[in-house]
């Protein structure tokens, strides 16, 4: 599956990475697995890495369905969720903006798009120079 989801509890972080094509069905499956994980819940910060994405599934109706499920899973529970989309290619930026713009102000999700890995890590308050360093040094639970 070209989507991986890891929870790094010590940093209150969910790291999501897409490689290849973003498929709606695989995104839905990953979201369902995340929702069932014992460490999942509102208030976790999210780093969504879209730097290795090559294409987007064009089923926009299904994408909006998933966005509604994401709102149920991660938002609207009185706890703010901060989400950083990291994208540095035209296709990644398109996907990041679709994701960011899918959150309503009432959802409790604050989402931003950044193009630089350093900025993403600093913005999330993470004490690492690279995502690779973060994953090497932290115990991450795959979802």
Image (cartoon, helix red, strand yellow):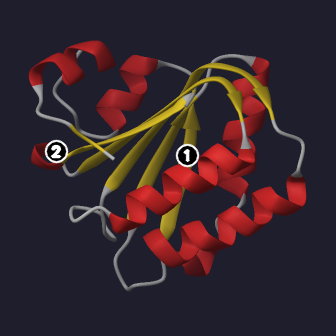
> Which residue is identified by label 1?
112
Residue 32 placement (x, y as % from top left)? 49, 62
Asked if 53 appears above or below 45 in the picture, the reply is above
Residues packed near mark 2 inside 10 Å, few (<14), some (14 to 19) or many (20 plus): some
Residue appearing at x 60%, y 71% in the figure: 69
Q: Is residue 46 left or right of residue 53?
A: left
Q: Secondary structure at mark 2?
A: helix
Q: Is residue 135 left or right of residue 118?
A: left
Q: Which mark is residue 11?
A: 2
Determine which quarter of the picture holds residue 137.
top left
How far is mark 1 from mark 2, CA to CA? 19 Å
Which callout, 1 or 2, points to the residue nearer the camera? 2
Whether residue 130 appears in this view of the structure is: no
Q: Nearer the viewer, residue 21 or 100?
A: 21
Determine which quarter of the picture holds residue 41.
bottom left
Residue 53 placement (x, y as % from top left)? 66, 22
Residue appearing at x 51%, y 57% in the figure: 31
Q: Nearer the viewer, residue 72 or 43?
A: 72
Q: Is residue 2 left or right of residue 89?
A: left
Asked if 134 appears above or below 73 in the picture, the reply is above
Whichever of callouts 1 and 2 sits on the residue coming sooner in the sequence is: 2
């Amino acid at each position: 599956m070209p989507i991986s989801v890891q929870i790094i509890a010590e940093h209150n972080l969910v790291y999501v990475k897409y490689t290849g094509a973003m498929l709606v069905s695989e995104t839905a499956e990953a979201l369902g697995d995340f929702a069932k994980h014992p460490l999942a819940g509102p208030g976790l910060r999210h780093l969504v890495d879209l730097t290795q994405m090559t294409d987007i599934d064009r089923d926009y109706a299904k994408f909006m369905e998933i966005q509604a499920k994401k709102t149920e899973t991660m938002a609207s529970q009185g706890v703010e969720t901060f989400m950083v989309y990291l994208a540095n290619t035209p296709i990644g930026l398109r996907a990041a903006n679709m994701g960011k713009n899918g959150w309503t102000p009432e959802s409790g999700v604050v989402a931003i798009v950044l193009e630089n890995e350093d900025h993403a890590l600093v913005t999330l308050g993470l004490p690492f120079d690279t995502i690779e360093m973060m994953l090497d040094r932290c115990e991450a639970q795959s979802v």
